[in-house]
Amino acid sequence: MKERNALLAIHLGALLFGLSGIFGKLAATTPNMIAGGRALFAILALGLTAVLWRNRNALRPNLRQVALLAIGGLLLGAHWVTFFEAVKVAGVAIATLGFASFPAFTVLLEGLLFRERTRPMEFAMVGVVCLGLVLVTPEFSLASTATGGLLWAVLSGFLFALLSLLNRASTRGLDPVQAALYQNLTVFVCFMPLAWPLLPSVRPMDWLWLAMLGIFCTGLAHSLFVASLRVLKARTTAVIFALEPVYGILFAWWLFSEQPTLRMLAGGVLIVGAIFVSARMAR
């Protein structure tokens, strides 16, 4: 893959990840059902990818890695459930911006768990993200529905940061697509039984949105991300992925008339700007 194609791939991947909230809002079912159904279609997409583009140099996971991948699957499923709960409660824009706080959690958790030195600029980035989150809601109050949705989204970002650090520690030498397949299998096994009683009430259109989530926003997006990392630097991909909430807000504005207020836009600019600066400074 040439650099130009890799840039197109990573932009498409960021766009697909940004559409997750849109399809989750369109699916008129519970977050547990969304997580289980998304995992089902993601397994099909990732399984096909693993067969077609098999990495023969990748190692087979040992017992410890399988256990860590299963824990990662639980974190992934919990991240999905909390994110889609935020979408249902507060809308796509607030949910997407709240989730965008995960780089701040990653900075703090890396210093705590891996004992890596956190630079003053990184602490400043965390502060800017926190200020942005306060501005995102029309009124930051625990009694507010928007604030409740934002807290669900921030929890989703925290769980995703934990998942990222767990993957860093457990997937070395493994094929990333294969690792994602193991984790989605865990999500399906754990969350589909919770959603089983709802299966008769899921409409055909809801299955379509779940298929879009699993095939495009998970399987294809992850494959594009992995393929682009073989050509682009990690900091380049991180900067482009900072556009994910921008894509989500624009589509929510267009499809659901979720017009962001000036206060929300100011908070979004702070959050996305902090991610940009952090990614540019990353080694």
Image (cartoon, rainbow, N blue to C red):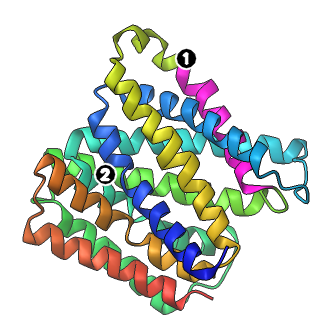
Q: Which is nearer the eye, 200 or 209?
A: 209
Q: Quadrant of the C terminus?
A: bottom right
- Res 252 label: none
Q: Sequence order check: which comes first, mark 1 or mark 2? A: 2
Q: x and y percent of residue 264 in the render?
A: 16, 67
Q: Amino acid at mark 2?
A: Leu
- The residue located at (43%, 32%) in the rendering is 210
Please report the bounds of the magenta region as a residue range. 175-192
- The residue located at (44%, 9%) in the rendering is 197
Q: Can the viewer see residue 71 in this picture? A: no
Whether residue 109 appears in magenta in the rendering, the answer is no
Q: x and y percent of residue 229 in the render?
A: 65, 72
Whether residue 176 appears in magenta in the rendering, the answer is yes
Residue named by callout 2: 151
Q: Is residue 41 above or below residue 142?
A: above
Q: Quadrant of the N terminus?
A: bottom right
- The residue located at (35%, 51%) in the rendering is 153
Q: Which is nearer the eye, 171 or 217?
A: 217
Examine the image and state in which quarter residue 202 appears: top left
Disc 2 packing (10 Å; few <14; some 14–19; many ≥20): many
Please tell me whether mark 1 sits on a helix, a strand or a loop. helix
Q: Amino acid at mark 1?
A: Pro
